[in-house]
Image: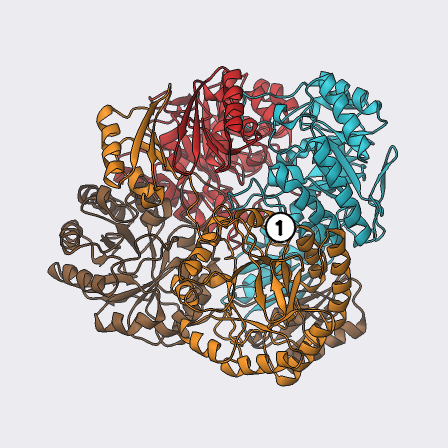
Chain colours: A cyan, B red, C orange, D brown
Amino acid sequence: MIIVMQPEANEEMIAGVEAKILLHGLNVHVSRGTERTLIGAIGDERKLDPKVIESLPGVERALHIVKPYKLVAREWHHAQTVIQVGNATLGDNAVCVIAGPCSVETDEQMLASAAAVARSGARMMRGGAFKPRTSPYTFQGKGVEGLTMLKNAAATVHLPVVTELMDVRMLDTFLEKGVDVIQIGARNMQNFDLLKEVGRVDVPVVLKRGLSATISEWLMSAEYIAAGGNHKIIFCERGIRTFETAYRNVLDITAIPVLKRETHLPVIVDPSHAGGKAWMVSALSCAAVAAGADGLLIEVHPSPVNAWCDADQALSPDEFSVLMKKLSAVCTAIGRTL
Amino acid sequence: MIIVMQPEANEEMIAGVEAKILLHGLNVHVSRGTERTLIGAIGDERKLDPKVIESLPGVERALHIVKPYKLVAREWHHAQTVIQVGNATLGDNAVCVIAGPCSVETDEQMLASAAAVARSGARMMRGGAFKPRTSPYTFQGKGVEGLTMLKNAAATVHLPVVTELMDVRMLDTFLEKGVDVIQIGARNMQNFDLLKEVGRVDVPVVLKRGLSATISEWLMSAEYIAAGGNHKIIFCERGIRTFETAYRNVLDITAIPVLKRETHLPVIVDPSHAGGKAWMVSALSCAAVAAGADGLLIEVHPSPVNAWCDADQALSPDEFSVLMKKLSAVCTAIGRTL
Amino acid sequence: MIIVMQPEANEEMIAGVEAKILLHGLNVHVSRGTERTLIGAIGDERKLDPKVIESLPGVERALHIVKPYKLVAREWHHAQTVIQVGNATLGDNAVCVIAGPCSVETDEQMLASAAAVARSGARMMRGGAFKPRTSPYTFQGKGVEGLTMLKNAAATVHLPVVTELMDVRMLDTFLEKGVDVIQIGARNMQNFDLLKEVGRVDVPVVLKRGLSATISEWLMSAEYIAAGGNHKIIFCERGIRTFETAYRNVLDITAIPVLKRETHLPVIVDPSHAGGKAWMVSALSCAAVAAGADGLLIEVHPSPVNAWCDADQALSPDEFSVLMKKLSAVCTAIGRTL
Amino acid sequence: MIIVMQPEANEEMIAGVEAKILLHGLNVHVSRGTERTLIGAIGDERKLDPKVIESLPGVERALHIVKPYKLVAREWHHAQTVIQVGNATLGDNAVCVIAGPCSVETDEQMLASAAAVARSGARMMRGGAFKPRTSPYTFQGKGVEGLTMLKNAAATVHLPVVTELMDVRMLDTFLEKGVDVIQIGARNMQNFDLLKEVGRVDVPVVLKRGLSATISEWLMSAEYIAAGGNHKIIFCERGIRTFETAYRNVLDITAIPVLKRETHLPVIVDPSHAGGKAWMVSALSCAAVAAGADGLLIEVHPSPVNAWCDADQALSPDEFSVLMKKLSAVCTAIGRTL
């Protein structure tokens, strides 16, 4: 850690900072420049909170030099992690497409969805049984019954399933029902008790980025899961909140190369929630793959107009089929497979 | 709801929208303008999801006309709600100051804090027993033991307590320990299962605004609580996330007059978390009260330099005492009491 | 325009709004719903400012139904516009790469840059002679002399040039020097007097998006240029400002499909300024082309480490050559040429 | 400057950074920590661009330690600057209210405005003759004629005037007409050629904050003016752009105490543009003064409903009179005068 002293800091203040650093078991190095005195704290700086140092008299700023995350960092684990889920893989040369409806509605809808996404080459199936809705007065999901419907439909096409866990009390049920991949939604990215619990199980986790989460905070949330022992974590970029109102969220395409550099874990993209409109999905999907994403999470519904939620963002089976052909060509261009 | 059709929409498309509206039990009114056809859906539009309509062929946009919230809206409940907690009130002419340390550390620290905040005129005491921390490697709070320490300390000065509930499984413990006001933190503002549970109990709730939550989403989260039967909700503005990096968050002062107009529930401000530095707290507190806030949530620690978390943002007892005198003058200037 | 009245609006207030609309030469249509009265203003609503209506007693909101831009809108000009600059084209099936250094430094640097970018297939050359710098104490560009150096270097490889105009008083000099495409920088996107002046000349304009400009504001700035008679406008997305601090700006990839739908004018992307680091340029360039961009504006310097500004974001000639091969493959995959 | 090397940086890379620093005339200090090597560049670091260092092999980050601004910094000029304009002062104990209409319309409107604002205690008059409008099809201001109307109206009540300069070619006219204070609008905050020109004259400048300008960029824009010799600069906070859509902009109240600490120059607030609605002005004005603002810039129109622009945000003379009484009480509470 580097501590920048205020220009008017005196010797007593400098000594106070030194004492605090030594108290935490780190060593001290003082450097007197022309305009500022700098103090270096040498050792395991993760033990030292910058805010504690910044509260001391005479301190202008305290800066961490090393990253606060470790288990998820590529710096500490150079090899790319590949996560196997049934026959699907995440993090290797194949781009993994996960598709299905926003929410589980009926057995018919789920069976039709499963057939459609499998036919076009999806490797996993998605579908929400528990829905985080802004309004308490809208459809909240089919619940436990929905988990069964999702598993049954996916079984007919031999695909593993991904579905969102919102309430920590439902984790055992998810395990009993055989959910293959647990999704933590954007609104729960910093629900630390939930992260701790999924960190204790041996099921892969898709960790969606919070609407205004920084890359660093997102990596720290993954660190919560990893710290519990579960290292099967998949990052999912789904658009961030900005000042722009012409579309729901801004897909942060830069996050892909940056995460691929910072972490050894797979990175996927949800183009459906990012843009919020079905007609944007094709361009955003191609961009995500071209930028290096390891997978996509796409909403497909047998009849989008009749979907019970997010009707405007789901692709029809035909649209999905066209998109998969386009994605296949982009994958080839960059030396990957679909 | 108003539906704006695309300029090239034909009669068949218009008929399709009409059919969908009638199916939901609303009436239809079509208006053909010079550049666009508009369709009005007349009736209880809360039943109709704009996304469903926007997925129909030929539709450009669908706009809700009425607000999506009802129980918390001043439009439906004109009189200001006053919430009584022990001897303290929130929402009447008196500005209620809630103060105490960021986290519960030791009995000594809590007793000293209680004495200090009560002496200067605080009406409630705050203190975190469960701490939402970005990193899994930092202090996570004293837990249940901390609740006891908080209650014991506050009892010596006869103040009710406010403390944060992060995990739904802890709600019963909060009730057993006699927590007077439950705080829902910024990161859990859209943890809908947690909102539903606190909606079922008869304890006032401080609902902090999410870091990038809109006013509308915040009101909808309150609506979740109110829909469960608990109408004792206190909004707490604590700064929003923007592009600015010179301070932690931007205190959204405009939210105060806007919320006071939109809802009948009390609105308070947390100047300590917003700015993130102790030296900013005085200016932000005075501004919040001058803008019409019903209360403040201020961090005070007997020895800020030794605080276990957020050491740089707590006021010392002396600083808090000076601030309370200043606030008292501002209250008088605007016709309120402290 | 649709005017939503407040629930408590009375007949007198409704009549007041009607009178104001009629005064502006539009017709009125009143619709009384269950919770709100709506008033429609029928006719050329561009004559009516929503703010004027919102200032009237009893009005809750006034909403424009049609888009405020016209000359640049695809709604009014369906065919895609193709802009010819020397042998290069923008807006047709070929993706146009414009490359060169951030700033013009020396004749040697410019000649080496020109040779490098032409060799790898760039269709135009870029280079800044006037530099908008945050600090008055840093290099401000070579000025008029730089324009000559840029033109001379580009002439050796028969490429047209793009360079930024910051000061309206320099426009005549730009024309005399034969600048082929005038760039309006992000900081000047709403410098309306500058927009008006470049609207009066017959030289294509690259209009960069402001750091926090909405799509609508950006289109309106183009409308300023078009209203003067110059319809040769090229939109350039260069990253927007958000809360994220891990990279300079967030490349708004969604803006590409959205602009391609809203306007008939070409859309290009500047991946160098967006990410701010040379190692991000390849991923962002591929993503931009895959999302449908008509061109790219890339920084290339013969020796990035020695560049006088933005040294960390320029590609070396070798890196640029590798990128062009990759882009060529992506173009083929989506049915375009490079 | 501190340079953080990548963990895998070797001795050759470290030597390369050292050589670059020495080349720029600074001294070098190398510190080898447990996880990273740090290199300190000692001397006048303003000569060294972090981007140049970050482009060198093996460098992870380069951080400036000192602030990039100097003339405007309180660190270099401790005493508060007081700017005198006619009988008004900015920066001393008196809070200076500047009021008037958004735009100059007619002589009658200006005379009525002048009488109204002077009567209630405004110390300067505002009014726009040149208007920066998002659309080229809306009223662009009365131009030079408007300057005369503004000066004439203000002369009847012996008030100095503030008005916006958009085009550098108009500066001489502003000086001839006797404009007392030149306003640089939010959209021109980084129009560096305009800043340089107003830096050469001896007229005070109100520098509005750009919609998404950081505090640091804002101070650097002021540094441009000061570097030209004009040190009479007044910062004006007018709301920033965020994700929130319930109001036009978010008034950044925290900027007030932060700027008062960072710079010796006066800081004022424009509550009218920030919120965008007349009914918000009172709460925001009181908050701004309570937070320490040296002045306010308030829109007042003799008949807001008939204003030619921003009709929804102007106060009527009666509303302004009520507000001034409220502000007077708040000033007294915090030990200032109005």
SS of the residue at dot 1?
A: loop
Residue A42 placed where, x, y %?
Answer: 71, 60
Residue A66 seen = no
Please tell me which residue is depicted at 64% across the width and 48% down the height of the picture. A252
Residue A119 placed where, x, y %?
Answer: 81, 31
Residue D81 placed where, x, y %?
Answer: 32, 67
Please tell me which residue is depicted at 69% across the width and 61% down the height of the picture. C281
Give the side of residue B65 with respect to residue A236, left or right. Answer: left
Give the side of residue D38 with respect to residue B311, left or right. Answer: right
- The kind of residue on which mark 1 rests is Ile
Give the side of residue D221 with respect to residue D102, left or right. Answer: right
Query: Which residue is label 1 attached to?
Result: C253
Q: Tell me if mark 1 has few (under 14), some (14-19) or many (20+) residues whose alpha carbon lies within 10 angstroms of its own.
A: many
- The residue lying toward the viewer, choosing from C301 and B76, is C301
- The residue lying toward the viewer, choosing from A76 and B302, is A76
Please tell me which residue is depicted at 76% across the width and 45% down the height of the picture. A327
